[in-house]
Image (tube, helix red, strand yellow):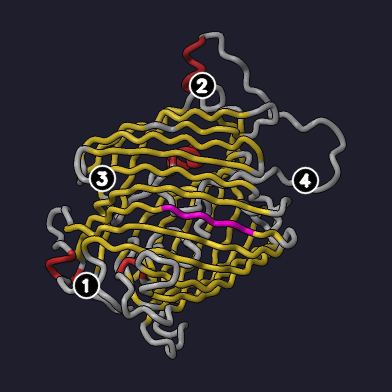
Amino acid sequence: MRGVPVLLALLVLAPCALPRHAAGQVPAVPPPRQEGPPTGPPPTLPQPPVSSHGISSWFNPATAPFLPIPEIVEDPDSGTTLGIIPTWLKTDEQHQIRQIIAPDVMHNTYFGWGVHGRIYGYPTTDEQWSFTAEVKQRVERGVDAEYQLGRLRDRRWSINLSLIYDRDGTQRFYGIGNRSPEADQTNFTDEQELFQAQVGLNLTRAWQLKYTLRTRIVNAEPGTLPRIPSTDVLFPGLRGLNTSKEFLNRLAVVYDARDDPTVPTRGMEWLAYGGMASRGGLFNDSLYSEAGLDGRAFWPIAHGTVLAAHIALRYMPRADRAPFWALSTLGGGQSVIAGAQPLRGFGAGRFYDRNSFSATVEARHTLGTLPIASTRLDLEVAPFIDLGRVFSSLGTFPVSDLHKVFGVGFRGVARPFVVGYVDVGYGSEGAAVFTGINYPF
């Protein structure tokens, strides 16, 4: 087994599971749902008795000024990380989270000691921002700034901006194809600078036209992990090693009828997209083209239980000049629209090829609610099944020769619905454990 989940973290999952996140994936905070018209002042949470001993209240999660969260992570690719995360949750009069401050000091078996600072801000239900920065003794460092406005689509335009510098020493490559052998595992250091802007024209609350502009510079450097060959040694002719540039234009049509964009319980979202990428100009020196479909649906099947399903299909009609890191990939714990798809029994980037198919079904069941730091934490359990494959030919039947992963997820949802998770999956190469923010899809 590649990792063991730390279930203690479920008590504080919402602020503690804060890894790097893909562009455009700031932890989302929608408005609280109302089942009918308000009939009075908003309900208040029951307040625990105030301790007369002052500092003793620091050890009560419901009254502590900050949460001293232990950081214990065993990642399938990133090794063991131990540390402490003092986390502050700032809430308003309605006990809705308006800011999360979560610095930490940690030690990683691969990269030594490090520090990481995180600030997540939620000024309104329609606007949010985040800023994170980290540095370790060896190899890894990064800065990530993101901003969203108009996420509720009740105005004409929605905007999402991302600016990222990231140097990640844990990346893996096993070759191209749906059956690339585990024995061919290699490691490379992924250094990239990325700017992404997404602008959505909201035709209605459900229908949107979305344009994405992304420019990034990727330097796939030799790997540094012990006992794992460097990618440039085992795959010396791989396209995309060393420094590459990408300039992407993508247009999407979005239909979103979910009752909530972060913690949906009913409805569906569908997105159809197409795009072209070049080395630096608008359409000159083409690298690849892409087209795909991404859909998710939610059905309440019992009190406190939601059946959630996700499907993603990505094609690259032209990919002869695409760097390997731009290909379709499966593996890891998160779905990225038009990007990597989850396969939670394998590490991130386990399978690469031109095209990919992915499907997931999970049952999200609420176990109970805990008071914590002036807000509430809903605890969920979610058994799941992940299916997926990558393939090179446009004529390949996408649902044949699928990889299968079975597992269970443990989630914490803090008002107003910041989601953290621990997901444990088992596939043909053993088990893997992932932690993070937001639902996997």
Judged by depth in the image, the label closer to the viewer, 2 or 3, is: 3
199 falls in the magenta region: yes
Residue 174 is marked as: none
For marks 1 and 4, give the one nearer the viewer.
1
Q: Which residue is mark 4?
A: 34
Can residue 246 be seen by looking at this rendering? yes
Q: Nearer the viewer, mark 1 or mark 2?
A: 1
Measure how far apart labels 2 and 3 are at the Cα level. 31 Å
Lower sequence index among marks 1 and 4:
4
- At which x and y percent is residue 136? 25, 39
Q: Which residue is mark 1?
A: 238
As for residue 365 lying within the magenta part, the answer is: no
Q: CA distance from mark 1 to mark 2?
A: 51 Å
Q: Is residue 169 left or right of residue 226?
A: right
User: In this view of the protein, which residue sits in the foreground, 146 or 307?
Assistant: 146
Residue 301 shows in this picture: no
Label 2: which residue?
Answer: 65
Residue at disc 2, secondary structure = loop
- CB atoms of marks 3 and 4 within 8 Å: no
User: How many C-alpha atoms fall within 10 Å of the one at disc 3: few (<14), some, or many (≥20)?
Assistant: many
Q: Most prominent secondary structure in the magenta stretch?
A: strand
The image quadrant that residue 298 belongs to is bottom right
**Residue type marked 2:** Pro
Q: Nearer the viewer, mark 1 or mark 3?
A: 1
Question: Which residue does the numbered mark 3 point to in the structure image?
Answer: 140
**Residue at 55% across, 74% down:** 293
**Quadrant in the rendering for residue 170:** bottom left
Q: Which residues, given as a range, are shown in magenta?
A: 195-200
Mark 2: few/some/many CA within 10 Å (<14, 14-19, 20+): some
Q: For this rendering, which residue is in front, 338 or 72?
A: 338
Question: Residue type at mark 1?
Answer: Leu
